[in-house]
Image (cartoon, rainbow, N blue to C red):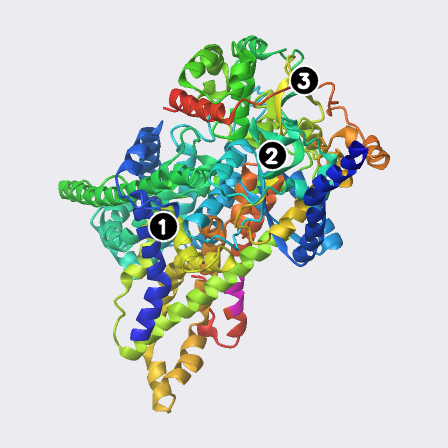
Amino acid sequence: MRLAGAILTLVIGAPVLLGAALTLATGFGWQPGLGRVDLGWEGFTEALAAPGILTSLRLTLVTGLGAAMLSLVASIPLARWLVTRQSASRWLTPLLAVPHAALAIGLAFLIAPSGWAARLISPWATGWDLPPQIVTLGDPWGLSLILGLMLKEVPFLTLMTLVAAAQRPVAEQMAAGRALGYAPGRVWARIVWPQLYPALRLPVLIVLAFSLSVVDMALILGPSNPPTLAVRILRLYGAPDPAQAVPASALAVILLAVMGASAALWMVGERAVARLGKALIRKGHRGVSRRNWSGAGLIGAGGALAIGSLGALVLWSLASFWRFPDALPADLTLKRWASADWAGPALTSLTLALVSTALALILAMLWLESEDRSGKRLPLGALIVLPLLLPQIGFLQGLTTGFLWLGLPPGPVAVTWAELLFVFPYVMIALAGPWRALDRAHLASAASLGAGPTRRLLRIKLPMLLGPICAAAAIGVAVSVAQYLAVLLPGAGRVQALATEAVALASGADRRLAAILALMQAALPWVGFALALAVPAWWHRNRRGLRGGVA
Amino acid sequence: MRNLLAAPVLAASLALPLAAPAFADWAQTEAEAKGQTVYFNAWGGDPRTNAFIDWVSDQMQEKYGVTVEQVKLSDTAEAVSRVQAEKAAGKNDGGAVDLIWINGPNFLAMKEAGLLHGPFVSDLPNAKYLDLSEGSAATTDFTVPTEGYESPWRLAKFAFAYDAERVSDPPKDMAGLLDWAKAHPGRFTHPNPSNFMGASFLKQALVELAPDPAALSQPVTDEAYAKETAPLWAWYDALRPLMWREGKSFPENESVQAQLLADGEVDFAMFFDPAAPAAMIEQGVLPPSVRVWVPEGGTIGNISYVAIPYNAAHQAGAELVANFLLDPATQAHMQDIRVLGSFSVLDPAKLDADAKAAFADLPTAPALPTLNDLGPTLPEPHPSWMTKLTEDWAQRYTK
C-alpha cells in the first residue's frame, strides 16, 4: 500500500510538481544555467507589455470559457436524446477517438473560405469563381477555434452525462416529471440533469483547463496576430534568445492564474444558475410539449461537421491537384500515400501509445489492487486530476529542463514519461469504476477454495475485467496518440510522432501530406477501439455474461 | 637567389600549419565519424528539403557509415533554444543537436552566446570550391562575418510568385505593388513578420524604399531607423488596408501563403528560393500557370548555412555532412529541379570540367528563372534592422 503510493507519487505527481515549480522559478527570473539567479517581477512586466497581450488574454478567455460553456449547454439536449438510444451513443466513441490536431486539420480544410464547403456550393450557387473574402478560419474572435473545441468536447461531456445517468433511475424520474405535467425537455433540463451535474463538475473543469491552454488546435484554427496565450507562450519558448524563457514562463504562470480564476468564476456561475433554475421551477411553468428537435439537430450539425472534416481529409490525401472552385479533385491517386513518410511517425506514435498505455495500466492496477488488499482507498485523488487541470504548457517546458537536470536526455523515454502523465489519469478513471464494481462474491468463492490474493488477481479479477481493461487501454492509446506538447517539448524534435508531424505539416505547403498524417493519427485510436471491442468478445466467446468492451 | 629559395620555404611554412594538420585531422574526423548518428535540425515544413536530407542520409550511410537523422523543426529557433536550454542545464557535451540549418539572427544569437563549434569550414576538403575571400557572399550571413562557424549549403534570394492565369500585369517594384493592390483589393498578403519570410518582405521593401540603402549595412541606431523607415511605413500604411483580410491577419509562413495562392485566396506568394515555385508545380502543390517575378532593382539574397553547436554529441559526423553538402556532385543534385532546385553556393570559377558538366546537364522548367532573370542580388541589411523592424511592426499592427 505504502509502496504503491510512493511509486505513483514519484512517477506521476513529482514530474508535474517539478515542472510547475521550474516554470514558476523561471517566470521570476531564475535561470542558473545562464548565471541569473536574481528573482524579480521583470518577466511579468515584460510579458504584460508585449504588443497585443490584452487581445491574447481576451481571446484565451473567450475561447476557453466559451468552448466549455457552449459544449456543456450543447451536451444537455444531446444526452437526453441519446440516453434512451444505447446504440446511438456508440457513435460518440469514434468522434471521441479522433485526436484534436487531426480534427482541426480536417475542419480547416472544410471551413476555410476556399475550403471544401465553399467549393461544394461554388460557383453554381454562389457565383464565386474565386474564394470569397470572408473571414472564417483563424477569425479574430476565435469562433473557428471554439467550433473545433466543441466538436471534441461535446461528445466527451455527453458521454460523461450518460455515464452519470446510468447510475440513476432516469426513466422513472422522467416518467414522474411528465406525470407532473412538465414537457419532456424540461423534465430533463430542470429535474434530472441538475442531479447529474455534480458528476460532471470535474469533466467540465478538465474541459475548461484544456480549452484555455490548448496549443495544437489553436495553431491550426485560431487567430495568429495575436494568437491565444498558450500559443504565445510556445512561440516565446521557441525564441532564439534564452532570456525569453523568463517572460514565457511568466505568461505560463499568468495562464495558470487565468485557469484558477476561470474555475472560480465557473463555480460562482454554477450557483447563480442553480438559483435561477430553482426560481424558475418554483414559478411552476410546465412548458409546452415539443418534439426534442435540438438533440437531433445538434447530432446532425455536429455529425455533418465531423464527417465533412474527415471527408475533406480523405479527399485531400488522394488529390492530385484540386483547384478552387472544383467540388472534387481533378484526379484521385494513391501516389502521395506511396511516397509520403507516414509509416515512420505512425510506428513512433504506436510504440509510444503501447508503452505509455501499458505503464498506465500497470500503475492503475497497482493502485486498485493495493486498495483491495489493504481495504482502504489510497489518498492520492489529486494525482489523477492534477496533470489534467494544469495548463500543459505551464509545466511541460519546466519538466523538460527538469529531465535534463536528472540526466534524462530528450527523446523517446522523456516523451513516454510525459505522455504517461496524461494517459494514466484517463486509464485510471476508466478502470476504477468497473474494478470497484466487480462482484466480490466471486472473489470470496475463490478465496474459500484456497486461492491466494495473487491467484485471485490473475485467475478471477483480470479475466473478468478483460472488457474494461481493453476499453481503458483503447482510451489510453487515444489519449497518447493525441498528445502534441508532450511529444514536442520533451522530445526535442527527435521524436517524430503523428501529432507533431501533422501540426508541422498543417503549416507547410502540401496539404495532401498534412491530410495523410492527420488520417493516420485518427486511424490509430480507431483501431484501438475496434480491438477493444473485438478482443473481449473473442476471448469470452463462450461466456455470454462477460462479452463486453467499450461502453 | 635568396628570393628563389625563400618563396617555397615561405609557402611551405604557410601551408604546413594550415593544410597538413587539417588533412591529418580530416582522416581522423572520418574515422571518428564512422557509426555516428548526426541529428540534423532543419526546418521540416518543406517535403522536398526533407526528401533531399533523406537522400543525404542514404549517401552518408553508404559512403561513410554515418547515419543522418533529420529533426524536423517548425522554426529554427527551436533548435537554438534547445542548445541554450542545455547550456542552462550545464550540459556542455553530448548535446541533442548536431547540425542546424541556420541563418541570420539565429546564427548571430548562437555566435554571440558562444554556442557554436568552430571555426571549422576551412578544415572541410570541399571548402576549396567556395569563394572564401573576405567579404564574399559565402563568408557573410546578413552582414555578419561567419568566421568559419557556419558552412554554406544553398543559395537564397527573394522572389515573388504569381498565377499568370489571374495576374496579367505584375508590378515592377514596391511602389507599383501599391498601385496594383489599389486595383485589386484583398488579393495580396505577406507572411506574418514574426516569421522569417514575412520579415524578409519588409526588408525587401525597406531596401527599395530607404532614402540611403547604404545605411542599412551598419548596426541600427534610433536616428537612422527613423529616417530610413519613414517612407516604408508611409507606403505600408497605404498598402495594409488593401491587403487580404484588410491586413488584420497574415499567413503564418511562406508555405501557408503558397497554399493561399494555390487556393486562389490571394494572387501572390513569396519565397526565398527562386526555384521553389517550379519545384512546387512539379509536386502538384501550385498550379502550372505560376511564374516568378522579381522587382526590377533586384532582390535581397543570402546563403543558407549549417552550423554545429558547441556541445554537439557528434561533431565529427556533423563536419562530414557539412563537407558532403559542398561536394559539387551534391550541389548539382540539389540544383536539379526534380530534386530541390536550389541554386548552388559553389564558385563556378573554382569548378573543374566534370563538376561543370554536372551542372550543365540539369533540366529546366517554365517557372524556373535563370540567374539572369533574377537581377542583381541586394545585400541583406544588418540583422539588428530586422529585429527592430519586426518589433516595430508588432507594436504598430498587433493590437
Of residues A178 and A450, the one drawn nearer to the viewer in this rendering: A450
Asked if the stretch drawn in magenta spans residue A534, the answer is yes
User: Badge 2 sits on which subunit?
Assistant: A
Element type where label 3 sits in the image: loop
Q: Is residue A111 above or below residue B88?
A: above
Residue A352 higher or lower than A325, as above or below: below
Name the mark nearer the viewer: 3 or 1.
3
Q: Observer-nearest residue: A524 or B101?
A: B101
Q: Residues within 10 Å of mark 1 (few under 14, many from 20)?
A: many
Spatial CA distance of label 1 from label 2 is 32 Å
**Residue placed at 26% from the left, 58% from the top?**
A172
Image marks 3 and 1: residues in contact by CB distance under 8 Å: no
Q: Which residue is denoted by mark 1 in the rendering? A: A395
Label whose residue precedes the other's in the sequence (1 or 2): 1
- Residue beneath disc 3: B376
Chain under label 3? B
Q: Is residue B22 left or right of residue A220?
A: right
Same-chain status of marks 3 and 2: no
- Look at mark 2 in the image and give the residue it sits on: A509
The picture places residue B89, in percent across and down from the top left corner, at 41, 52
Q: Which mark is residue A83?
A: none
**Which residue type carries mark 1?**
Phe
Q: Which residues are magenta?
A: A530-535
Q: Which chain does tag 1 point to?
A: A
